[in-house]
């Protein structure tokens, strides 16, 4: 991974801390599906997160932005939890991402600049099934980093 990719991941993480809009009841009046962000806590100070960052180009709240807010003022300690959202069951452009976050932003900056924190991300066009349940998963351990949507009922890797 180049320094450019590290800086891009850092900018994405820091921008995810901004307030993000949510869907209104009118948006969710028809069929819906549930999407779970996932995380792997490494040591209470660092975690790998897999999440949806945008729906149709619009930033949304996610596990990374919530962890950043909840970890403020706790030194190097990271507060990471579960997060899910209900989205309309219609064709959407979803931006999905995976990267390492830390309790202290300076730790993340150096991790991304040094290349020791890998990232993955892409935008997919996806139509969830009505009442479907999905989670965002990925692989940052191998050379071929990847992030995808997984159907919770079948464990099928969708994208």
Image: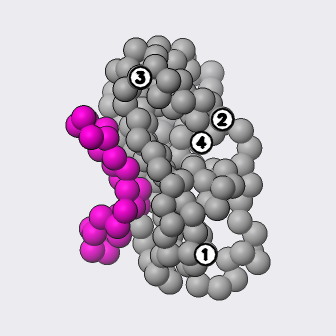
**Label 3, on which residue?**
2
As measured in the structure, the alpha-carbon distance from the residue carrying label 4 to the one carrying label 2 is 12 Å
Mark yes or no: residue 124 visible: yes
Q: Quadrant of the N terminus?
A: top left
Mark linked to residue 15: 2
Left or right for 53, reference 35: right
Q: Position of residue 142 (x, y in %)?
A: 23, 37
Residue 141 counted in the magenta span = yes
Q: Residue at x 48, y 76 (%)?
A: 128
Instruction: Please tell me whether mark 4 sits on a helix, a strand or a loop.
Output: helix
Instruction: Please tell me whether mark 2 sits on a helix, a strand or a loop.
Output: helix
Q: Position of residue 3 (x, y in %)?
A: 46, 19
Which of disc 4 and disc 1 is earlier in sequence?
Answer: 4
**Label 1, on which residue?**
88
Which of disc 4 and disc 3 is earlier in sequence?
Answer: 3
**Label 4, on which residue?**
66
């Amino acid at each position: 991974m180049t320094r450019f990719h590290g800086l891009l991941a850092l900018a994405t993480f820091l921008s995810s801390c901004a307030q993000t809009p949510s869907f209104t009841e009118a948006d969710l009046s028809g069929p819906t599906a549930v999407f779970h962000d996932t995380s792997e806590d490494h040591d209470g100070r660092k975690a790998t997160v897999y999440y949806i960052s945008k729906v149709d180009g619009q930033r949304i709240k996610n596990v990374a932005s919530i962890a950043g807010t909840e970890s403020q003022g706790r030194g190097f300690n990271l507060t990471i939890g579960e997060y899910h959202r209900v989205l309309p069951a219609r064709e959407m452009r979803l931006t999905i991402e995976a990267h390492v976050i830390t309790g202290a932003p300076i730790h993340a900056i150096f991790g991304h600049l040094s290349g020791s924190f890998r990232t993955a991300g892409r935008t997919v066009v996806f139509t969830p099934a009505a009442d479907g349940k999905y989670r965002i998963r990925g692989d940052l351990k191998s050379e071929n980093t990847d992030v995808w949507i997984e159907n919770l009922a079948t464990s099928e890797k969708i994208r």
